[in-house]
Image: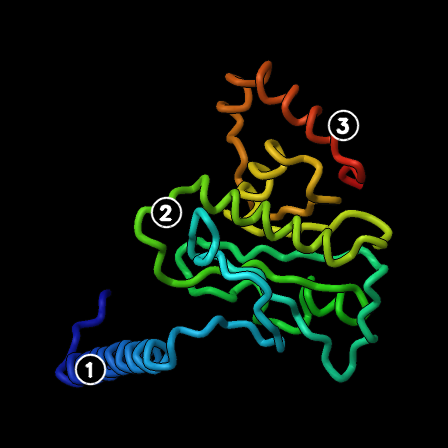
Amino acid sequence: MPRVPVFSDFFEYAVDATQRSLLFWDTLRERGNEYLRHEAAGKPPLLTFEHEMLLDGRMLEKPCNYALLRILPGDGDLPTDPALRPFVVVDPRAGHGPGIGGFKADSEIGNALKLGHPVYFVTFFPEPVPGQRLIDVLLAEARFLELVRERHPDATGGPCVIGNCRAGWAIMGLATVRPELPGPILIAGAALVGPRTFAAHRPRLLPVAFRVAASNEDGFS
């Protein structure tokens, strides 16, 4: 036989609903305050690593809101060996703030620094340059990789380029038009094509992939 609610049940429900509502609105308040503090600080990237800016994409001939940073080694890292293969981590822009690709010490950046590799980070500014297009970002990233190669002429191989999420397909787009720039490419969580798209365009897509791998001096290994 079902239990008939009593007044104490309604009272407990009202107390619980009130507490949950207060916690919800307090969370929104804290989030809003955190956003205002971050905005007042100039919207700095979320990078946890010391770094220096090498090239500001807003200053290029085709300006865009991307920049190339050099990550500085920490106290527990080996000294940077310029002859080792450089690593370039591209910050994914997928709705979150800049620097999300390097906010943890236990990451691609941290592991490469520990071994003494030169490490670079491609980040972005929150606001795009008026009139910038996707092709302008591609040209900027190509210039970034050119600069990395210029800084390491005696490296054991071309730069290893790492991109997660949307940075992954941006890297692959760059590799199709400038396959001589990246070395090994590591992408994760990048939806390049869906199954149906791949099936529909397989005759076109496969030759492109093979051309990139064949013309890349380091391949994908």
Q: Nearer the viewer, mark 3 or mark 2?
A: 2
The residue nearer to you, when weighing 208 against 107, is: 208
Residue matched to label 3? 214
Q: Position of residue 33 (x, y in %)?
A: 30, 82
- The residue lying at 28 percent from left, 77 percent from top is 32
Label 2 to label 1, Cα distance in Å? 48 Å
Q: Nearer the viewer, mark 2 or mark 1?
A: 2
- The residue lying at 56 percent from left, 36 percent from top is 173
Name the quarter where the N terminus is drawn. Answer: bottom left
Query: Splitting the image into 4 quarters, where does residue 104 fall?
Result: bottom right
91 sits to left or right of 27: right
- The residue lying at 60 percent from left, 72 percent from top is 52
128 over 169 or under it: above or below: below
Q: N-terminal of the two: label 1 or label 3? A: 1
Q: Label 3, secondary structure: give it.
A: helix
- The residue lying at 73 percent from left, 76 percent from top is 73
The residue nearer to you, when weighing 2 against 189, is: 189
Residue matched to label 2? 132
Q: Dot 1, crowdedness within 10 Å: few (<14), some or many (≥20)?
A: few
Label 1 to label 3, Cα distance in Å? 64 Å
Query: Splitting the image into 4 quarters, where does residue 154 fall?
Result: bottom right
Name the quarter where the C terminus is drawn. Answer: top right
Q: Label 2, secondary structure: give it.
A: loop
Q: Nearer the viewer, mark 1 or mark 3?
A: 3
221 over 6 or under it: above or below: above
Residue type (three-letter) at the residue carrying disc 3:
Ala
Residue type (three-letter) at the residue carrying disc 1:
Thr
Q: N-terminal of the two: label 2 or label 1? A: 1
Residue 18 disc label: 1
